[in-house]
Image (cartoon, grey):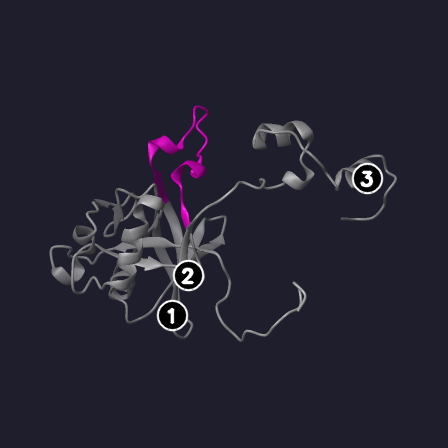
């Protein structure tokens, strides 16, 4: 078969890669074993709105964290870097009903910024505090839609100009059942139409080729009436 000849593989959640995150939460009385701070590994997480900033996570009803989030309406999305990869996997295959996963993984729970009940993971490079606004029952999972109320990040992730540099965090992704570090930087938003000087500043090297340059030049000169 030729490289781009298609085969049918059936219906599945094949959208990959996806971010893998450690979602932390707690009950209203964390002194109780069943309500202590907990961590659940989630691969079905994403951004759903910009203004206000909103995210979603999808959780099975059978998961221990489900009732904690449902009861308090709070959770924290903790981004995962290379050093947290093993703990991330562990928290996805063990239940917080049976053990203290913070203790098992040697992680530190800290009160989440902007929330009343949920805890964040101190060792995470970035923690996103979320308040649930809606719960959608979808089938195997319920989707918690939430508004972002605060974001905290490790100080080393900011450069001299105050820009957040997430590439320094060495984040990981989840691809078809396996964990991967992020690889080579290929570009940035808008790089396909960026000027030479902007491209060089952002990428650190000059453009070697630009097949869209003639389109921009013709459009700027009014010679091309087509829309791209």
**Residue placed under numbered mark 1 in the picture:** 141
Judged left or right of residue 92, residue 50 is: right
Residue at 85% over, 34% down = 221
Dots 1, 2 in contact, CB < 8 A: yes
Q: Quadrant of the N terminus?
A: bottom right
- Residue sitting at the far top: 160
**Residue placed under numbered mark 3 in the picture:** 219
Estimate the x, y position of residue 86 in percent, counting from the top left: 29, 52
Judged left or right of residue 197, residue 136 is: left
Residue at 39% over, 33% down = 157
**Residue placed under numbered mark 2 in the picture:** 44
Residue at disc 1, secondary structure: loop
Q: CA distance from mark 1 to mark 2?
A: 10 Å
Residue at 81% over, 39% down = 219
Residue at disc 3, secondary structure: helix
Estimate the x, y position of residue 142 in percent, counting from the top left: 38, 68
* Range covered by the magenta-colored residues: 150-172
The answer to whether residue 184 shows anywhere in this view is: yes
Q: Relative to 112, say whether 144 is above or below.
A: below
Q: Residue 63 falls in which quadrant of the image?
A: bottom left
Judged left or right of residue 80, residue 184 is: right
Which of 11/86 is in front?
A: 86
Label 2 Cα crowd, 10 Å radius (few <14 / some 14-19 / many 20+): some
Question: What label does residue 215 carry, if any?
Answer: none
The mark that comes first in sequence, 3 or 2, is 2
Q: CA distance from mark 3 to mark 1?
A: 48 Å
Estimate the x, y position of residue 59 in percent, counting from the top left: 35, 65
Q: Count the marks: how many?
A: 3
Which of 223/92 is in front?
A: 92
The answer to whether residue 75 shows anywhere in this view is: no
The mark that comes first in sequence, 1 or 2, is 2
């Amino acid at each position: 078969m030729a490289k781009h000849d298609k085969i049918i593989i059936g219906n599945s959640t094949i959208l990959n890669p996806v971010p893998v995150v450690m979602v932390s939460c707690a009950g209203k009385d964390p002194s109780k074993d069943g309500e202590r701070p907990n961590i659940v590994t989630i691969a079905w997480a994403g951004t759903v709105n910009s203004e206000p900033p909103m995210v979603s996570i999808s959780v099975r009803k059978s998961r221990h964290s489900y009732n904690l989030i449902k009861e308090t309406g709070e959770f924290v999305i903790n981004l995962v870097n290379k050093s947290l990869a093993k703990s991330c996997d562990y928290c996805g295959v063990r239940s917080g009903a049976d053990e203290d996963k913070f203790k098992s993984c040697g992680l530190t729970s800290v009160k989440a910024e902007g929330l009343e009940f949920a805890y964040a993971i101190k060792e995470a490079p970035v923690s996103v505090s979320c308040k649930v606004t809606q719960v959608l029952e979808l089938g195997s999972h319920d989707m918690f839609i939430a508004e972002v109320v605060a974001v905290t990040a490790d100080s080393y992730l900011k450069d001299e100009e105050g820009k957040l540099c997430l590439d320094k965090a060495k984040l990981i992704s989840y691809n078809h059942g396996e964990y991967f570090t992020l690889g080579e930087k290929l570009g940035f938003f808008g790089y396909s139409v960026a000027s030479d000087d902007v491209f060089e500043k952002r990428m650190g090297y000059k453009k070697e080729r630009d097949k869209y340059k003639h389109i921009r030049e013709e459009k700027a000169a009014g010679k091309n009436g087509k829309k791209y």
